[in-house]
Image (spheres, helix red, strand yellow):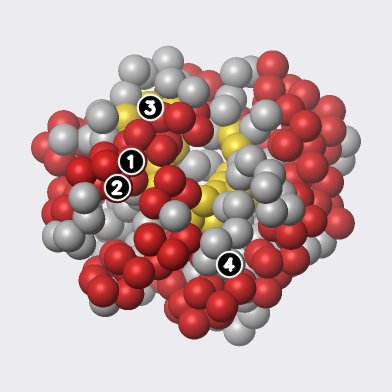
Amino acid sequence: MIIDAHTHIFPEKIAQKSIQTLEQLGGETAVIGGTVQDLICSMKKSGVDKSIVLPVLTKPEQFSKINQFAVGINKLPEIISFAGIHPHCENINKLLDIIAEMGFKGVKLHPDYQNTDITDERYIEILYGCKKRGLIATIHAGLDPASPNHIHCTPQMSYDVVNELTPKGSKPFIVLAHLGGADCLNDVERLLVGLPVFFDTSFVLEKTEPARMREIIRSHGYKNILFATDSPWRDAKQYIEIIKSLSLNDIELNAILGNNCAELLCI
């Protein structure tokens, strides 16, 4: 089984406009459209069995609308959508109860789009709440064009959060997207490699030297690496080929491409 642990889609009526806006913001061109059907079509072409969709709340008041959309797409067998939550939402624990009751397996946090450092006490409350409820927390890590002058989740910040929430020996539930911050891999390797935290491979594979990528996988532990693309911004077929070119053994390869994520999701 191949699972893409990091994708994004939008409701059909706003998908095209949303993609255009993000293309202008980030200077990147989407490789597929932004609807759920675009994603499913891409999955079939690339051999991906399931995709995790990660909705991002840019405003607290989007909680109900975005998560209702996420519930709807969760009915599709190919899709596992996480919930969105914003650190400035009121009644964080009540909202996390709602998220758990709605059947979500995790939440997505984007410190840059939410203009809040990941070390903020409101994020810490969310993360403790996720841990208590058995929810996965996927966090955008490193630089994002939305906030070029201030990284809201640096490797040092991630180090502080991981050490507080999942001290050594703990079962990881936090996923740091983009390999923990592909723009600052020296700090990732110095601070984060080997800690009980997952890295996903979204948006980084073609930017990272194969030997270095292989070393990070083996130093961090292949069981804590999740295959991910950041679709619609990266192509799943290309990313699968890159993973397969890293000279990993079959156990490592199958774990990264899907088994690790399947175990994390309990599917």
Estimate the spatial distance between the alpha carbons at disc 2 and disc 1, rounded to whole Å: 5 Å
Residue at 38% across / 61% down in the picture?
Answer: 218
When asked about the image quadrant of residue 77, the answer is top left
x and y percent of residue 73 in the render?
43, 23
- The disc placed on residue 79 is 3
List the residue tagged with mark 2.
252
* Labels 3 and 2: the sequence-earlier one: 3
> What residue does disc 1 label?
255
The alpha-carbon separation of the residues under discs 2 and 4 comes to: 20 Å
In the shown orientation, is residue 227 left or right of residue 123?
left
* Rendered position, 199 above or below 151: above
Can I make out residue 210 in this image?
yes
Image-based side of 35 in relation to 172, left or right: left
> Depth-wise, is mark 3 or mark 1 nearer the camera?
1
Q: CA distance from mark 3 to mark 2?
A: 24 Å
Binning the other alpha carbons within 10 Å of mark 3 as few (below 14), some (14 to 19) or many (20 upward) gives: many
Label number found at residue 142: none
Mark closest to the chain's N terminus, 3 or 1: 3
Residue 242 in percent (x, y) is at 18, 59
Distance (Cα) linking label 3 and label 4: 30 Å
